[in-house]
Image: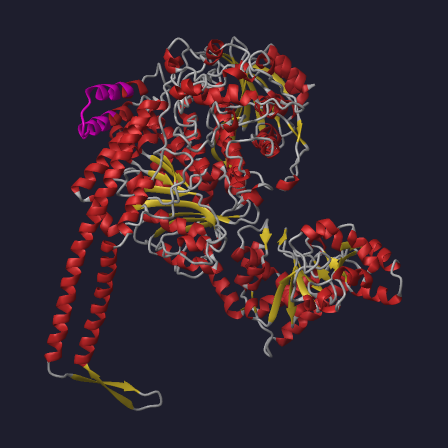
Amino acid sequence: MSKEILREIIEDFSPEKFINFFRIKNPHFRPLKINLGIENEDFTLAEKIGEIQFQDSDIIFCTIKVLKELTERSGKKKQYEVGKKILKNENSDAGIFIFYDKEKNFRFSLIYTEYFGTKRKFSYFKRFTYFVSKNQTNNTFLKQIGEGDFSSLEKIKEAFSVEPITKEFYKEIQTWFFGALDKIHFPDNKEENKPLHLIRLLSRLIFIWFIKQKGLIPDKIFDPEELKNIVKDFNPSPASNSNNYYNAILQNLFFATLNQPKSERGWAFDEGFPQNKATYGIKTLYRYEDKFLISPKEVMEIFSEIPFINGGLFDCLDKDDVGGEIVDGFTRRENKQAKIPDYLFFAQEFPVSLEKYQIKSGKKARGLINILKSYNFTIDEATPIDQEVALDPELLGKIFENLLAVYNPETATTARKATGSYYTPREIVEYMVHQSLLEYFKNKPLDIPEEKIDLILSYSDEKVELEEKQKEKIIEIISEIKIIDPACGSGAFPMGVLNKLVYVLGKLDPENKYWKKIQMRKLKEELKKLSEKDEKEIEERFKELEESFNENIFYPDYARKLYLIENCIFGVDIQQIATQLSKLRFFISLIIDQKVDKNKENFGIIPLPNLDLKFITANSLIGLGVEKTIQKTLFGNEKIQNILDQIKEQYHRYFRAKLRRDKKKVREEIEKLERELAETLKFAVKSEKEKELEKLIYISKKIKEEIEKIKLEPNQFQIIEQPKLFGGVSRLKIDLKKEKIKQKLKQLKEIEEKIKETQKIITGDALNQIAQKILAFKPFDPNYSNPWFDPEWMFGIDDGFDIVIANPPYIQLQKALNKTQKYADLYQNEGYETFDRMGDIYCLFYEKGIQILKPKGILTYISSNKWMRAGYGKKLRSFFLKYNPLVLIDLGPGVFESATVDTCILILQKDKNQNKLKALTLKPQDRKNIYQAFKEKSILLSNLNSGVWFIGTEAERKLKEKIEKIGKPLKDWDVKIYYGIKTGLNKAFIITTEKRNEILANCKTEEERKRTEAIIKPILRGRDIKRYYYKWAGLWVIIIPAGWTNENKGKEKPETFIEKTFPALMKHLKQFELEAKKRDDQGDYWWELRHCAYYSEFEKEKVVWTPVNSEYSFAVLPPGYYFINSVFMITGDNVKYLCALLNSKLMRYYFTFIFSSEKEYNYASEEKVKNIAIPLPTSENRYIVNQIESLVDKIISIKKQNPNADTTEYEKQIDQLVYKLYNLTEEEIKIVEKYE
C-alpha cells in the first residue's frame, strides 16, 4: 500500500498525497497546514504539514517549493540551511523536509539533531536525503521508505540508512563476481589474474555509471532491446555463448571513446596484414566492425554523445610493441581477444556455484548491468553530516576493498566471509583527518586559539569570527601542506583529506578569492623556473588557471580540488589495482564539479588530469638504498638538482597533459631525464664515497701515529681500591699506557671497517644497483608494482610530509610471502629499529611513516592494538617514546566488522617527547562522535616505558600493578594449556548418541564392541561450556589417533586391518571416505585423526573455556570428556581453584580492562589466559584457597542436578575471597565493582 502511494507521488507529486502516506505509516501522525513564512528568490509555499510526538522525541513534516530547477546537486546547501532553521524555530528534534519543483522532482530529506551522551547535549545536525525523479531509478527510495518503520525516530532513521543498501549491493556484486570468475577469458588465461581483470572491469563500468548520472553516457548502450539492433548475435540468455557486447560496446567505449578526443576518433579496420600494420598498436581507435549490425559511421554516432574523459582509467593496458604483453585484449587478433559472455551483463539470472570460495550465497546471480540499474547512485561524496541515501563513491570503496582483499592472498579467506572488514569506517576516517589537521595547524604561526581552529575544521553551524588576514594565512598554509597515505587502498584517507580541506576552503573563502590569488602566484613562480620557456605553454597555463575558477564551467569546489590534488595529496600502495581505484575516486570527485553543456566542445567537460604521479604503486617499506647522509649531499649537487627540477617540471606537465601524444611526449622526456639522473647519480655517489674514503684513510693514519707516540711514553700505573664483599679492601693496579693503546686500537678497528665498506661501495655493484632501481621506476605502467619507494625521487619531496595518515596492513612477519621467503626475510635488512621476526608488518609502517615526516610532522594511524601489550611491541613502544605521542584511542574489536581484530588510533608528532599523551578506551556508543568523547573522557598517560601501555587512571594503574605483583602469570605455573580436537570432518567423526548406539549394536562380538566403545568419547562444543559447569549435548567423537594403525596392524594391509578391527565403525566411516581423504587434518590414513601429543590430558580433570564468547565462562570438566578445537583446557593441580579465580569478578575486570577494550565482546585467547596473574597456593593463603575450592564443589554439585540453577550467592562469596587473596582495599574493590 505504502509503495503504491509513493509510486503515485513520483508520477504526480502533491503535498496532500504525502499527508495520506504519513497517516498510513504512523496512526499518530497529526496533519497540519501551517505556513512557515518563507518567501524569497529560492523558496515559496513552505508549510508544516504534520507532526508526530514520540515518547522521547518528536518529528515535524514540511513541504517547500523551490523556484529553480531541482536536480541531484542543485540548491542542496540552501535547502539544508532552511531545514535547520525551521527545526530551531520549531524547537524540534527532527524533521522530514520535502523540497519540490514545478517539474515535480523532489528531495526527501530527514534532518535531525545529533546529541552526545545520555544528557542529550546538542552536538550538530545531520541530514540524509533521497533525490526522486520520474526520470530515474527510485528503487532505493521505494524500498526503504515504502517498507520503512515510522513507529519511532530511531526506526525512521533506519529508513534513511545507507548501510542496508550497501550490504545488499555488495552481496549481489560478490555473487556476480565469483559467479563470473570461471566464465570469463582474458588473453593471459591465468586463473590467479582473473580477479584482477574483473575488479578492473568493475571499476571502469562503475565509473561510467557515475558519469551516467550527469547525462554523459547514452542509455541505449545498456538497453537489451536497443542492443539487439546494434550488436551482432547479441543474446543475454545464459544458454547462449554470445560474447560480442563486451568487445563491441564496452571495450570501444573504454579505450576508443572515453580515452580519445572526439575530433580524433576513428577506426582500426581489420583489412589484413599490410593494411593493419599502419594502425597496429594504436589502442585509441575503434575495433570489431564485424561485431556490429550497423555501419562504422552509425557506431561513431552512438559514441559521439560521449565526451573525452582522459585520466588513465581507460588506458588500454595492452603493450603496443610487437610481442608485448596483452592484458585487456583489445585487438583484432581473435586468439588474443578478451571474451566475456553477454549474459554476465544482461541475464535476468544465471546459475552460480560459490562453495569453492567459502561463500554462503544464493545459487543464482543477475547480470551486472541489471544489478547496476536496480540501485540509485549519487556522484556526491557524503560527509559525516550530509548523505544522499544512494550508492556513492565512498561506499563503493568498501566493495572494492573487499574484492581487493580477495585478490590479495594474505586476506582472501576472511574477505570472502565478511563485508566491510577492510574499509575504514567513515566516522573513523573523519576523526583521524580532523585531528591530524588540527594538530598540524596548531604548530603553525597562526595566532588563533585551538578552539577556533577546531571550529573551522568542524561541521558545526557556529560562525567563526576571523580577520581576513587570518583567513588568508590559513588558506596559504593549506596550499603548502603535503599529506601521504603509504597504504592507500581504494583511497579512503586521501579522499577524506580532500573533502575536509575543500570544506574548509569553502567555509573561509566562498568566492575562491584567496585560493585563486595563491594559485596564480605559484604558477608565476613555477613558470619563472622553467628550464625552457615556451610562450604558447605559458599562455595555455594561465588560460587553464582562469578556466578552473570560471563558475560558468565549473562549480567552485573544482578549483579547490584540482590544486589540492596536484600539490598536496599523495598515495602509495603495493597493489596496482588499489592505486587505480584511488585514482577512480579522485576522477569522480573532479568530474562531479564540472558543468555539462551539450552546446560546447566536449559537452563542456574538461578532460581529467593524469594521476599516475600522485598515486604510485610501490612497496612503501623498501627504500632506494641510498644512505641519508649521501642523499643529502646529492641534493646539494648542482647537476643532480638541475635534473630533479626538470623532472618536477615534467611532472606538472604530465598532470595536465590531455592528448595521448602529449602524454607520450612528456613520459619520454621524464624517462630520458631519469636515465641521465641514474648515470649522474652513479658518478656523484662514487665521487662522494671517494672523498669519504680519503678522509677515513687520513684518520686511520693519524690514529696509527698516535699509537706509536703512546708507545714511546713512560709507563704509568693507577691503583684503585675496591671494598670486598665480606669486609676489607682489594687493590687493583691499572696500566694506563696499555689502556690508552687499547682504546686507540678500538677506534682504529672501527675506522678500518668503514674503509672496507666504503671501498666495497666504490668498487662494487651497489651504485649500479641504485641506478638500475631508478631506471626501473615505471609510474606510467599500470601493470607494474615498483619494488621500492622513495618520496624524494618519486614525488620530488625532499623535506618530508606534514601528515602521514593510514590504515596499514596487518600481516605477521612470520607468514610466508612466497614458496621460499617469509615477510621477515624481505624486510630484515632494511634497517628498521622496530623489526621483530615475531612482529607484524604494521610496526614497520609506523617507523616508515615517521621516517618520511618533516620535523614536527603528524603521523595518524589506525592499526591493530596488539603493539600496546604484545612482546613484539616492545621495540615499537620504545620507538614511540623517542617522539611525541599525542593521542591514543583504543577502539577495541568490531571496527572492521571482524570481531577478532582489536584496533587503536595513534596520533604522534615527530618531535621531542612532551609526555602529554592523552588516551581513551572508546565505547561503541561513542563512535559516532569520537572527538567529543575524547574531549570529555580522555586521561593523561604518564610514566610510559617500553612495558605494556595501559589506558587507565592512576588508581587503576596501581590496581593492575598490585594484581600482577601478588599473582603469577599462568604461563609460569606448572600447568599445561591445549586446544581441543580437530577432526577436519566433523560430520564423519562427531556422532550423536543414537548413531553411537547403532554402531555398537552392529558389533558382531563383545570384543569388537569393547574395542569400538573405547575409541568413541563424549565431546563438547564451545556452546556447551557454561560458568563452572557444562551441558553435554549427547555428542561423541571417534578417535583413532594418527599412528595407531601402523603400530597395531603388523604385516596386514592397513585397510584390511582397520576393517577387520572395527567393521561396524568402518561401515559408518566408509560413506565419508572421499571427503575424509581430501582433508588436511588427518593422520597416516583417512580414518585417523591428525597427530596430537596430548590425548592423555583429556583423561584428566581440567578447566575449559571457549575464547569467543559474549562473556568469560570457565568450567571444570571431569576426566574422559573431549571437546572440539574452539575450546581450550588447562590441566595440572588446583583445577577448581583456577576455575574460580578465572570466573571471578576481579579476573573479569582484569581481562576486559587489561587485555580487551570492550566489555561487550571478549576474546579470551590462549595468549591472554596465559598472562593472567593468579596467586599460587601457599601455606599463608591455603585457608582462603580451601574455602574457594569448597564453594566450587557446592556450585558444581548444584549445577549437576540443575544446570540452570542460580548460584549467584556462592559466586559472590568467591569474589570476596578473591579480593582477600589480592589484599584489595575498599577503594580498589569499588573500582572493580563499578566496572562490572
* Closest to the observer, 332 or 673: 332
* Closest to the observer, 1149 or 336: 336
The answer to whether residue 120 is visible is: no
Whether the magenta-drawn stretch holds residue 536 is answered as yes
* Closest to the observer, 421 or 260: 260
Residue 206 position in % (x across, y down): 51, 26
Quarter holding the N terminus? top right
Residue 92 position in % (x across, y down): 53, 26
The reply, left or right, for residue 80 in relation to residue 1213 is left
Q: Would you place residue 39 above or below residue 566 in this image? A: above
Residue 1134 position in % (x across, y down): 65, 71
Residue at 57% from the left image edge and 24% from the top image edge: 372
Residue at 17% from the left image edge and 44% from the top image edge: 637
Report the span colored magenta.
Answer: 520-544
Whether the magenta-drawn stretch holds residue 1118 is answered as no
The reply, left or right, for residue 512 in relation to residue 1013 is left
Quarter holding the C terminus? bottom right
Residue 979 position in % (x across, y down): 64, 60
Quarter assignment of residue 795:
top left
* Closest to the observer, 793 or 678: 678
Q: Would you place residue 965 above or below residue 158 in this image? A: below
Q: Main secondary structure of the magenta part?
A: helix
Quarter assignment of residue 349:
top right
Q: How many marks?
A: 0
